[in-house]
């Protein structure tokens, strides 16, 4: 086998592989000889079929199979021989060509991982959030739990702050009526919807009353056909309800799975949950800040286009919920910049792990799965689900490795602590996750 490599630019390499014809012919002859002992052809006894007949009947298909097998085997051998690190599946550039003497020649395009210079962690400046769960955080969460169990009762008056209002509406835009027929329904809590103009209109009406008005719908409005648009709107208040918070009594406490009905026990569980949430948020935020620093010091890192395209396709599929289907190429193109950032970040994080011999800690993987499982009613079943699902295990292992890289960097980089409140960390982590 003869191999030559051409750098076609960037991270793409063109391999030209030539396989001697006698090597291929030898495999063909061996396969036909094996077939001659197995095939059954009318007029011949089993195992006694002449080789000329076997060759005439099966020779073309056997040669095709051998060529395909040889191509796959020699391509992997050539990649290993040339010490290439394929980032995506190699692809044969043209159909294999049969040369004089029966030699086989083909070319394949291989996109390789970039060579990354050692990353000096000591040169990185990382700001680490310094936060802890306070009694105030626990009380706020307790109030949130009460809000979730608020009891609503209808009242015959105009709505005021904190009331829940059920609305029916339709709107006329330049593109037509929304909806085409009938009305849309919407429930808002006065003071919480973020749609001030709608709340003002709703609080001006008694239950059962309606009015016409022009509304400018916010960009993130739930009805996509109205988001960011001005429209003449027909609005009706169908009902107004006031809420009553439940007492934090034994019944309320036990409804959250606290068997002893103790408020102290409930608060302890709330604190544990908040601490788990804080830890996860801090990891997310620290990873985001580390990624930002890595992208800053390796802003010119070239990444494999195939990996970027695959990542963009995956991101587009998640948004369109078309898993198993190929997303529209235009949608995929819209994710290319974000995908390139993700791929570059992933390669840099992986390179940090490789350069510093950071290996996945099996104990941390187990602890992570146990932590997730503990939030469910049947932890053992959840753990069994994870250990029995390769995709879920890969996700956990990848997350654990990233945490280990972050921990290693924090031990070796220039770290400065910044005091933050619990909710500020959660907000910052959420924003960081959305930015990807």
Image (cartoon, rainbow, N blue to C red):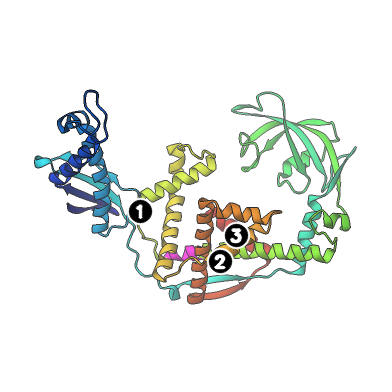
Q: Name the residue that disc number 1 marks.
A: 87
| Vertical comparison of 68 with 132: above or below | above
| Vertical comparison of 358 with 56: above or below | below
Whole-Å distance between the Cαs marked 1 and 3? 29 Å
How many discs appear? 3
Q: Name the residue that disc number 3 marks.
A: 369
Q: Which residues are magenta?
A: 290-296
- The residue at the point 75 percent across, 63 percent down is 269
Mark 1 or mark 3: whose residue is earlier in sequence: 1
Is disc 1 in contact with disc 2, using a CB cutoff of under 8 Å? Answer: no
Q: Name the residue that disc number 2 marks.
A: 364
| Vertical comparison of 293 with 63: above or below | below
Query: Where on the picture, by quarter, is residue 239?
Result: top right
Query: Where on the picture, by quarter, is residue 63?
Result: top left
In front: mark 1 or mark 3?
3
Whole-Å distance between the Cαs marked 1 and 2? 28 Å
Dot 3 falls on a residue whose secondary structure is helix
């Amino acid at each position: 086998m003869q191999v030559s490599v051409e750098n076609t630019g960037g991270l793409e390499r063109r391999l030209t592989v030539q396989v001697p014809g006698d090597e291929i012919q030898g495999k063909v002859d061996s396969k036909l000889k094996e077939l001659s002992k197995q095939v059954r052809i009318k007029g011949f006894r089993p195992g006694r079929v002449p080789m000329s007949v076997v060759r005439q009947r099966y020779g073309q298909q056997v040669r095709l199979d051998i060529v395909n097998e040889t191509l796959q085997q020699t391509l992997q051998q050539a990649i290993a021989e040339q010490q290439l690190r394929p980032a995506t599946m190699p692809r044969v550039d043209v159909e294999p060509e049969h040369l004089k003497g029966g030699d086989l020649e083909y070319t394949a395009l291989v996109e390789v991982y970039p060579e990354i210079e050692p990353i000096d962690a000591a040169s990185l400046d990382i700001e680490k959030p310094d936060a802890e769960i306070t009694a105030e955080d626990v009380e706020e969460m307790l109030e949130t739990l009460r809000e979730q169990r608020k009891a609503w009762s209808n009242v015959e008056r105009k709505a005021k702050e904190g009331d829940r209002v059920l609305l029916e509406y339709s709107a006329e835009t330049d593109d037509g009526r929304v909806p085409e027929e009938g009305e849309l329904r919407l429930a808002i809590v006065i003071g919480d919807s973020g749609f001030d103009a709608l709340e003002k209109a709703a609080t001006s009406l008694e239950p059962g009353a309606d009015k016409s008005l022009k509304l400018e719908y916010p960009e993130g409005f739930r009805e996509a056909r109205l988001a960011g648009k001005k429209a003449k709107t027909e609005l009706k208040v169908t009902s107004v309800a006031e809420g009553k918070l439940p007492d934090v009594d034994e019944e309320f406490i036990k409804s959250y799975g606290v068997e002893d009905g103790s408020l102290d026990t409930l608060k302890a569980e709330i604190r544990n949950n908040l601490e788990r949430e804080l830890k996860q948020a801090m990891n997310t935020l620290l990873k985001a800040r580390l990624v930002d620093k890595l992208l800053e010091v390796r802003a010119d890192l070239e990444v494999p286009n195939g990996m970027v395209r695959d990542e963009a396709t995956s991101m587009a599929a998640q948004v369109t919920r078309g898993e198993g289907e190929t997303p529209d190429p235009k949608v995929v193109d819209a994710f290319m910049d974000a995908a390139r950032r993700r791929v570059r970040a992933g390669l840099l994080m992986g390179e940090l792990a490789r350069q510093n011999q950071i290996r996945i800690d099996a104990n941390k993987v187990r602890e992570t799965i146990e932590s997730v499982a503990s939030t469910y009613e049947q932890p053992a079943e959840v753990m069994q689900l994870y250990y029995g699902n390769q995709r879920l295990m890969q996700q956990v292992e990848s997350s654990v490795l990233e945490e280990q890289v972050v921990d290693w960097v924090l031990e070796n980089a220039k770290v400065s602590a910044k005091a933050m409140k619990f909710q500020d960390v959660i907000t910052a982590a959420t924003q960081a996750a959305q930015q990807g």
